[in-house]
Structures are given as C-alpha cells and as structure tokens.
Image (cartoon, rainbow, N blue to C red):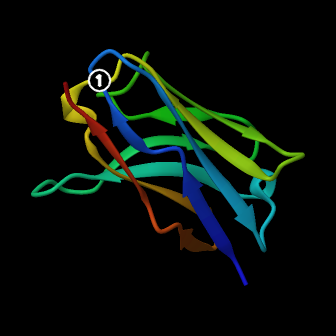
Amino acid sequence: QVQLVESGGGLVQPGGSLRLSCAASGIIVSAHIMGWYRQAPGKPRELVARLTEGGITNYGDSVKGRFTISRDNTKNTVYLQMNSLEPEDTAVYLCYAYRFVTYWGQGTQVTVSS
C-alpha cells in the first residue's frame, strides 16, 4: 500500500520560510517523479515543483528562485524548502508520486499572513 504523508505546514509571516516533508512508504522516491502541487480556494491546482528520477527539477513560474525541491533517498522522503513566502503562497500543498500511476498525499496547509 502506497502512502505519502506530508508535514511541515503551518502559519508563517510574509518573508518567512517553511520546509515541507513528504514521507513515502510502499514506493521508492528515487524511482518515481516526485513533486508538489498546491490548491488555493477558488483557484486551479498549480504545479509547484517536480523532481525526476534523474534529479532534474522543474518549478512553477511563481515560485522560481524561492522554492527548492529535494529528496533524501535514505529516508525515502521528498522536501520542499520554501523561502521568501508571500501571502499568495497560501494553499494546501499536496505531494505526489508518478510512475505509470499517480499517488497523492492528503495535503498540508500553508498560511502566509501577518
């Protein structure tokens, strides 16, 4: 059974940082495309970042230069380091894994507000 468990969300002030974690079980993260989407109320789901099996990264235009995706193969975990957070980054962040099929985590709320 595949499980993706996100953690690390919360409330942060504008300009602050958070690191999200996505701990995987039932799959090997280094053998999958791993990534993060976000869903804000009233907005379409948006790709935030993606990391391929070969280590290639892609980022949404709105987060380039501020967010970094990475993985720790020993912990079978993917991370999203988010810096210089803005109120517009407020959303539920969902981890996913793809290799022929897509698996999703339950999401973690990130709120950027003063």
Residue 8 spot, x, y in % from top left: 53, 44
Residue 57, position as x, y percentages in the image: 59, 33
Residue 99 appears in the rendering: no
Based on the displayed image, in which of its 4 quarters is residue 90 positioned?
top left
Q: Residue furthest left?
A: 42
66 left or right, relative to 1 = left
**Looking at the rendering, in which quadrant would you find the N terminus?**
bottom right
Per the image, label 1 sits on a secondary structure element best described as loop
Q: What amino acid is at disc 1?
A: Gln
Q: Is residue 40 above or below residue 61?
A: below
Could you tell me residue 14's position as x and y percent?
A: 26, 20
Question: With 48 as the anchor, is 88 left or right in this view?
Answer: left
- Residue at the extreme right of the image, as rendered: 74
Mark 1 Cα-neighbour bin, 10 Å: few <14, some 14–19, many ≥20: some
Q: Position of residue 25 (x, y in %)?
A: 76, 69
Where is mark 1, residue-wise? 13
